[in-house]
Structures are given as C-alpha cells and as structure tokens.
Amino acid sequence: MTAPTVETSLQTVLGLTGLALRTRLAIELSVAGFAGLTAFALRRGSRLVGPAGFILISLGLVCDALLHVLPRNAELTVSLEAAGLVLFFFGVIRVAIEAARAVLPGTTQASNIFRDLLMLSMYAVVLMVVLRATARVELTSLLATSAVISVIIGFGLQETLGNIFSGLTLQLQKPFEPGDWVRYGERLGRVEGIGWRATRLITRENERLEIPNNLLSKEVVINYATGAVAENLFIGLPYDKPPNRVKEVLIGVLRGTPGVLTSPEPEINAVEYADSAIRYRLRYWISDYAIAEEVRDSILSHVWYALRRHAIDVPYPTQTIHVHSQRPEEDLKAEQEAHMLAELRQVDLLEGLDDEDLKVLLPNSRVHQFGNGEVLMHEGEVGDFLHILRSGMVEVMARSPSGGMIHIRDLKAPAFFGEIALMTGERRTASIVARSDVEVLELNRQAFSHLFRTRPEALEQVSKIVAQRVSETRERVQSAAEHTPARRDGNWVVARMRTLFDL
C-alpha cells in the first residue's frame, strides 16, 4: 500500500473517530440538559419539559461534526453549515421557551398561541439570518416572495386566520383562563386551553368540546371563576303555610349545607303566586362551580327532610286525592300512644316514671325526621327542647378551647340529647350531627313543666342524670385544655331547674 493511500485511510479513520466522539458528546450534553431542566420543573410543580429542543441541538452539532469528516465540497459545506446552524438555533429557541414555562410563574397554564407565534417568528428570523450568512441569499427578494405567498394563503385561509386572531384577542383580554368553568350558550364546561383554531372545554359528562375562537369571541360567555358564584333553586310550597315560617325553614337548610358560603348570606324570596303554590327562590353562593351539582343535591335532599319535619307538603300540580284508613281514630290514637310510651320507657332520663307521668309529656311531643349530614342542634344556641332518638345514629361534637371540633360520642337509638340546655337554660354545649337518616321524638320545655308540677319528685331524679351528662360533656371538651375548670355539682343543676321551671 502506497504512502498516500495509507495517509488517506488514516485520515478517514481519524475523521470517523472524531465524528463518533463529537456525536456522543452532543448526545450526552443534550441528555444531561434535558434531565436537569426536567428535574427543575418537577421540583417547582411545573409542566414537564419536552425533549424536542435538545434533539434539534444534537442534530445541529452532528451536522457541524460532519463538516470535519466529509470531503471538501462547496455546495455540501454550505448546506451542512446552514442545516447545522438552523437546527442548533431552532433547538436553543425551543429549549429557552420550555425553560421559561418551567421557571416563570403563571406560564404553565398559559395558552399556546403566543408561544407558538413567538417560536415561529424566531424561527423565521434565524432562518433568514442563516441563509444570508451562509448561502448569501438576498433577503429583499425572499421577503417579497414571502409577501406574495402570504397574500395567496391569506385569501385561502380567511376563516382559519380569523380563528387565530380571535384566539389572540381572547388571550389578551383574558375573559377566562384554563381551569375556569364557563357557559357558552347551552354549553357548560371547564376551559382546558385556547388553541390556534378553537378553545377546548371539558363538560361534566367528560365530553371534549372544540369551540371555534371566531364564534366564541362573538357570543356572550359566562365565567363562573369570579369567587362567590350565585346559584338559584325554585320550589313551590303551600298557600296555607305562612311565608315567614317557610323562609325560616329553608334558610336553616341553606346555612347548614356544606359548600354554601356564609358570606354573602343565602337568601329566600317569595317570587310568584302560582296556580297551586307560592314559588320561592333559594339563592346561595358557592366558591367553586365544580361542586355546584353536589351542593344542589345536598340542598334538595335536606329540604325534603326539613319540610317533612315541619309538616310542609310540596303541592302537586294536579288534584290530590287522600285515601284515609277506615280504622276508628280512637284505635289509631291508642296504638300510637302505646308505641310512644314504650319508647319513652327506654330512656334513662325518664326511668322510674309510670304511665300516667309519661302521658303528661305526650301532648307536647312531635316526631321529626333528619337526613344524613344534617345538623340537629348547634353548639352555643338557645334550646328549649330535647330529642329522643327513635332510629338511626347521631354524632355529638363540641368545640375545644383551641378552636377545633372534637368528637364526644356517637349515639344510637334509644338515646336522648339536648337535655342540658332544656333543663338548665344554658346555651347548648355541643352540636348534634346526623350520621344516617334519623327519626327523633321532640319534647319541649312545656311538657316537663307540666310533669314537674304534677310530680315534683321527678325533678330530683331527672336532675341527677342531667348533672352527670353536664360533667361528662365538659370533661371531654376541657381535656384538651391546660387547666380544667372546677366541676359543677348536682346541686347547681337542681337550683337552675327550679328557677327555670318556676318551682
């Protein structure tokens, strides 16, 4: 083998080795940069960075490495140099924009229209500069040709361009942002993003809507991401029930429903005298429209139970025929009385009282139903009745000195609660929350007033049980405090009861 041949072969081997080393170095640098930027984005909770920019940078470096290996050729050199520079700077632009999205706050959920336009504009600038620097292309002729092509394309893509510019307008004015719940005509959904052609919404049924930006910019769009969003419910209730009483029942439901804001205050308004009922509007506010249906379901469910408890029927729009039992009324009354007496005998508060004593309580008793999650009693309110649990389960909760709610106990039938406020006149020391559908027998203060007047010895018996419950409740509430106040004995309870019942 001649010396020139050996030299040429050696140069080829060295060139290929250099190409392999440069290619490996380019790939390793790109992988390291991609991994580092992705890890940084994950630590900030931002969107993951794509690998496209790093791939373009690697290809640009490989094109530069090829210039040192391939035979010298003017056209090939210019082409590789131009391709390498274009790919490299395209990759740098893409990585810079991805990095800005990962670093700058508020850019993760931003629309991609501005990002794409910025990227395309920078691509065009890089392309023209590289062509001018490597291939000596005249930019004047290139711009003139581009203008002609742009006019032709503009006529053919008028609708598409209209959607693009409408999307830019929406992004500038920001009538909504990704994540907002909006209503467009009859359509309701959560904004996923604003694209070149259309804005994407995800409905409650998980349907993806693509609404052209041009149409969206011309119509009224309701945005529910304004903080407190008002919702309205309408219900028709009987004419024979006083509106003030009805409003009191309904406002209590709204105030006790989770998800309904306390500020602004819920409102109940009578809006119409309809054919068979007075129509009431229930207006309430929620902080997140995503839970609107769940809150509506809770309100409607709780309203049913509240209306049943207060003997308020929802009128039917048609004539209602009531079919009554043919059994004698006296028999039904006696059966109900016997059943209620049996329930009263199971309550230790009334232990030792005979049937005649228990019958004194019946005229002032009422049966109520509560739904799961409803609050039967609120801590701190004034109470003049107690509940005897007939079925279901309730939770007793109280506020600790630190401000949090603590669990006192769970009660199942037969049980009773509310006796402390009823017997002592103090404000309620705990809240009672239904943990299932429950039915309770309500006894008011007047019922016990009759009992204590007809049988004074019952006062001593009831006071002992009330004193025990007072001590138990207060000990559990105060267990979280550093200093437990002195306990009040049974004599204090008896004195309070004698004063309250005027005995």
Image: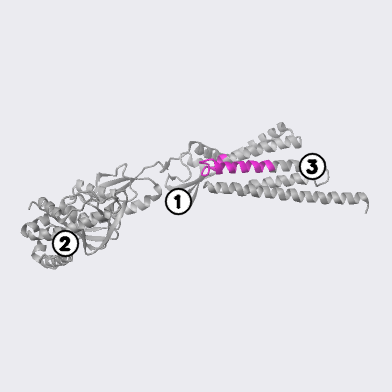
Does residue 125 sit above or below 109 in this rendering? above
Q: Element under label 3?
A: helix
Label 1 sits on what residue type? Thr
| Residues at circles 2 and 1 in contact by the CB criterion of under 8 Å | no
Does residue 335 sit above or below 299 in this rendering? below
Q: Name the residue under label 1.
A: 203
Among the two numbered marks 3 and 2 on one chain, the one whose residue lies closer to the N terminus: 3
Label 3 sits on what residue type? Thr
- Comparing 234 with 442, the one in front is 442
Q: Position of residue 18 (x, y in %)?
A: 78, 48
Q: Mark 3 points at which residue?
A: 77
Among the two numbered marks 1 and 3 on one chain, the one whose residue lies closer to the N terminus: 3
Q: What is the C-alpha distance between the residues marked 1 and 3?
A: 55 Å
- Comparing 278 with 177, the one in front is 177
Among the two numbered marks 2 and 1 on one chain, the one whose residue lies closer to the N terminus: 1
Q: Mark 2 points at which residue?
A: 349
